[in-house]
């Protein structure tokens, strides 16, 4: 727990919506990356206070399949939750908890900044509950509206879920207009969704553990004869994985087969397995791996394939693409999110989102291995810019200057 006996002049609360599990003094998570990043960031100075959804367990089975993350030195323990259904209720409980702590800081004359992912219900509630001298920093990691619309497409919750995201986004824009917020966006395209001026918007990309990048002179080689394609990601509608499976079927029918491995978990797991079994003998070409914890095993899987394929409908800067480049593997992907801007000459882009376009792009990759190697090399050259430590340094500098800014709030009104 955070020690509040010694009050700094500024305090920056950093919230992660990725829960951690504590077991025998170690911390674990299934949804790595952002929680790794904020824990790393929190170590830069004493003015940071983490807010982490956390569950303490005594049974070793509870951490099965989880990956160890850096142990936070101090944090406020928030209630953990799973799924969008519980998010609103539990995040309100967490906001009420943190609201009380922050008000104690304010009463002691401390300047407060609250940082966390957005659009997000926790930060929405806090921005309503807290007085107007509190400022905010939002990490925009993807197009949340498109993601939610893809998840709930065709369901009764579609309009409700979309409306909530629009509400949270409008709150962020309101805070930006009042100069009470800054943004850290994973790509310029996400900054453009919000009304930021040049001082309020910053591009960051903390997507890689520092040890994930291989040496520039080393490139793992798939020793198998068949061309091996890898998908890594959440098995949800916006990832378009069912079209990738259909593309594999079309490749078999055309006499141009490739091997496909699917790594991930999510609501479409059953549909993925049904899609594989629907076609006669397709299970000879498609392997459903399921969830793989981040770390040595995932590195080995990436190294054992020829290309990563990500046929998503929407992305920010997908971590799986950066991880493939870090391992010097080429990428086939749809031109979504920041990919066309960041990697215009490093990715084989898919024309459209249907299986025919996916098959055509993978088939091109199979026939143009020299070009593929050159493109992977370009991607690898930029991969270190996506490391967690590199980006934590950039964010720390901006947040510290922001928290110390004294040209503040006298004329601002609460929205």
Image: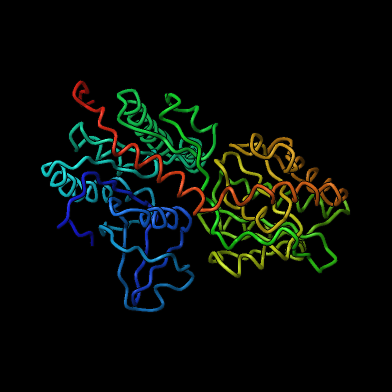
Query: Can residue 241 be seen in the rendering of this structure?
Result: yes
User: What count of labels does the image hold?
Assistant: 0
The N terminus lies in quadrant: bottom left
- Please state the horizontal and vertical placement of residue 230, each as a whole percent of the image: 69, 57
Q: Residue at x 54, y 59 (%)?
A: 209
Answer left or right for 198 relative to 110.
right
Observer-nearest of 50 and 17: 50
> Hey, which residue is sitting farthest left in the picture?
107
Q: Is residue 95 above or below residue 3?
A: above
- Please state the horizontal and vertical placement of residue 102, each as a whole percent of the image: 18, 46
Q: Residue at x 29, y 42 (%)?
A: 114
Answer left or right for 86 relative to 7.
right
Q: According to the image, what is the colour scheme of the structure? A: rainbow
Answer left or right for 86 relative to 239.
left
Q: Residue at x 46, y 44 (%)?
A: 394
Query: Can residue 273 be seen in the rendering of this structure?
Result: no
Observer-nearest of 66 and 108: 108
Q: Residue at x 17, y 55 (%)?
A: 6
Displayed quadrant of residue 415 = top left
- Please state the horizontal and vertical placement of residue 283, each as a whole percent of the image: 73, 64
- Please state the horizontal and vertical placement of residue 391, each as a whole percent of the image: 49, 48
Answer left or right for 405 relative to 390.
left
């Amino acid at each position: 727990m955070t020690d509040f006996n010694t009050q700094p002049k500024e305090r920056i609360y950093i919230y992660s919506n990725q829960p951690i599990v504590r077991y025998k003094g170690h911390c674990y998570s299934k949804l790595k990356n952002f929680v790794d990043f904020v824990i790393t960031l929190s170590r830069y100075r004493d003015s940071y206070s983490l807010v982490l959804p956390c569950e303490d367990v005594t049974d070793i089975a509870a951490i099965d399949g989880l990956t160890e993350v850096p142990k936070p030195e101090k944090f406020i323990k928030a209630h953990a939750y799973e799924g969008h259904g519980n998010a609103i209720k539990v995040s309100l409980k967490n906001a009420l908890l943190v609201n009380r702590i922050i008000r104690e800081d304010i009463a002691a004359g401390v300047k407060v900044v609250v940082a966390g992912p957005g659009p997000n219900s926790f930060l929405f509630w806090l921005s309503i509950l807290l007085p107007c001298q509190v400022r905010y920093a939002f990490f925009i990691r993807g197009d949340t509206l498109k993601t939610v619309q893809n998840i709930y497409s065709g369901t009764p919750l579609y309009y409700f879920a979309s409306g909530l995201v629009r509400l949270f986004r409008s709150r962020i824009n309101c805070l930006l207009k009042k100069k009470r917020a800054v943004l850290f966006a994973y790509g310029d395209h996400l900054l453009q969704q919000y009304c930021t001026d040049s001082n309020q918007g910053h591009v960051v990309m903390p997507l890689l553990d520092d040890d994930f990048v291989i040496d520039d002179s080393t490139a793992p080689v798939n020793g198998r004869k068949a061309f091996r394609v890898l998908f890594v990601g959440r098995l949800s509608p916006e990832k378009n994985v069912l079209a990738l499976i259909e593309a594999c079927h079309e490749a078999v029918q055309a006499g141009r087969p490739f091997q496909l491995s699917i790594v991930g978990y999510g609501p479409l797991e059953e549909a993925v397995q049904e899609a594989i079994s629907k076609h006669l003998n397709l299970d000879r070409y498609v392997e459903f791996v399921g969830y793989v914890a981040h770390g040595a095993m995932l590195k080995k899987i990436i190294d054992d394939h020829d290309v990563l394929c990500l046929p998503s409908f929407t992305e920010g800067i997908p971590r799986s693409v950066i991880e493939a480049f870090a391992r010097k593997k080429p990428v086939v992907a749809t031109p979504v999110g920041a990919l066309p801007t960041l990697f215009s000459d490093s990715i084989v882009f898919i024309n459209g989102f249907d299986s025919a376009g996916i098959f055509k792009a993978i088939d091109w990759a199979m026939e143009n291995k020299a070009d593929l190697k050159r493109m992977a090399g370009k991607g690898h050259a930029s991969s270190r810019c996506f490391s967690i430590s590199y980006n934590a340094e950039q964010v720390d500098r901006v947040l510290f200057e922001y928290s110390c800014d004294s040209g503040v709030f006298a004329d601002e009104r609460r929205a």
